[in-house]
Amino acid sequence: MNVEAQKLTAKDFATNQEVRWCPGCGDYAILKCLQRTMPDMGVTRENTVFVSGIGCSSRFPYYMNTYGFHTIHGRAPAVATGVKLANPELDVWVITGDGDSLSIGGNHLMHALRRNVGLNILLFNNEIYGLTKGQYSPTSQVGTRSPSTPYGSVDRALVPCAYALGAGATFIARTVDTAQKHMPDIFKRAHAHSGTSFVEIFQNCIVYADGIFEGFTDKKAAPDNQLLAEHGKPLLYGKEGNKGLRLKPGTLDLEAVTIGEDGVTADDILVHDETNKVLAQMLIGLQRPDFPMVLGVIYAEENVPVFEASVTEQVQGIRESKGPGDLNAYMAKGRTWTVPS
Ligand code: SF4
């Protein structure tokens, strides 16, 4: 029940806890942005839960004036699934990092995504383990030097959105910690989505991986190196807005082109369709510097059965046909025995 009649503000979603991230960490900007956006979503504090695992970003629940769990490494999706199943009316957010969700918790994240649990999952990707002093993570690029890879990582980096798409995610978006105008829209879309929403946020770790996203997030570099995808609009970018993506003639590959060069016209540019899984896969897979980094809602599939609704419906159906269950009777039936004291 909504017990808060008045419109809430960002301050209502902030706690009195001292925020303990390194000065200049991108986490601050994400926190402030989410606190500012919550009132616009029409949510209430008593119906909101933040669940996190372990890592720098996982301190988030302490700073949101809502319910919250700071759980164990990689297990936030499992705990959040339980919360959502117990009370499907709650708004449940999962805050996680690249190590927490894609290494330690890769298994748990996969199952939340494929089940389409009604969770809003925000993955802060800084391509490093910050909390444990800078070891390379599953999203670190080849060559990343860290205490655990002093000569440079040789692992191929995992692309979080590709992982999510492969696991069956029904909503996939990307944004940047400094994009204070873009992030709120993405949060609102994620919150409005029915089922699991997966949002990758490029987050600068000023201590162990400072500036690794500058190539497409820096104010000067951004226009020519990031593409803000919008459903129904041409996939255009560039300072002049004249660069774009098209299908390379005779292939199923994307090509970065400039309108007015080599006979390219505006009609050649692909129009974004966030319901098209094949297009989503292609956009997610684009690598810089040959292509821009694609941000925005990349994939959204509505009307997919939601896990908690399916479970509730199944349980209700069985109760109606067989009556309420008796757990004690069930446990005692069949081959059971008593351990003598
Ligand atoms: Fe932020 Fe990096 Fe410091 Fe962690 S170590 S709080 S990610 S700047």
Image (cartoon, helix red, strand yellow):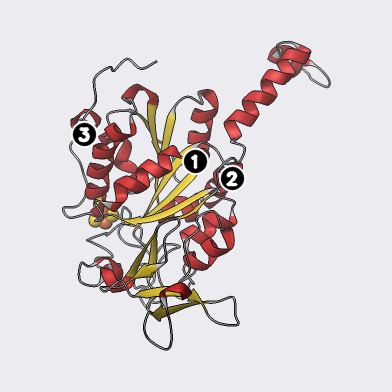
Q: Amino acid at mark 3?
A: Ala
Give the residue at x 36% y 63%: 135
Disc 3 under 8 Å from ligand 1? The reply is no
Q: Amino acid at mark 1?
A: Pro
Determine which of the numbered discs, if any, sits on residue 10 in the image: 3
Does 239 sit above or below residue 96?
Answer: below
Is residue 247 or residue 112 the one in the foreground?
247
Query: How much space separates mark 3 and mark 2, taking CA atoms?
Result: 33 Å
Nearest to N terminus: mark 3 or mark 2 = 3
Determine which of the numbered discs, if any, sits on residue 77 in the image: 1
Q: Secondary structure at mark 3?
A: helix
Q: Please state the horizontal and vertical placement of residue 55, each as a whole percent of the image.
A: 35, 48
**Which quadrant of the figure shows ligand 1?**
bottom left
Is residue 212 or residue 273 the one in the foreground?
273
Q: Amino acid at mark 2?
A: His
Nearest to N terminus: mark 3 or mark 1 = 3
- Of all residues, the one furthest to the bottom in this rendering is 262
Residue located beneath label 2 in the image: 111
Is residue 255 or residue 132 the one in the foreground?
255
Mark 2, other Cα within 10 Å: few <14 / some 14–19 / many ≥20:
some
Mark 1 and mark 2 residues within 8 Å of each other at the beta carbon? yes
Mark 1, other Cα within 10 Å: few <14 / some 14–19 / many ≥20:
many
Q: Tally the numbered discs.
A: 3
Q: Please state the horizontal and vertical placement of residue 106, each as a whole percent of the image.
A: 52, 52
In the shown orientation, is residue 30 left or right of residue 103? Answer: left
Q: Please state the horizontal and vertical placement of residue 92, each as a whole percent of the image.
A: 43, 33
Mark 3 and mark 2 residues within 8 Å of each other at the beta carbon? no
Does 67 sit above or below residue 97?
Answer: above
Does 149 sit above or below residue 115?
Answer: below
Give the residue at x 83% y 20%: 334
Q: Please state the horizontal and vertical placement of residue 75, each as a whole percent of the image.
A: 49, 42
Q: Can residue 287 be seen in this snapshot? A: no
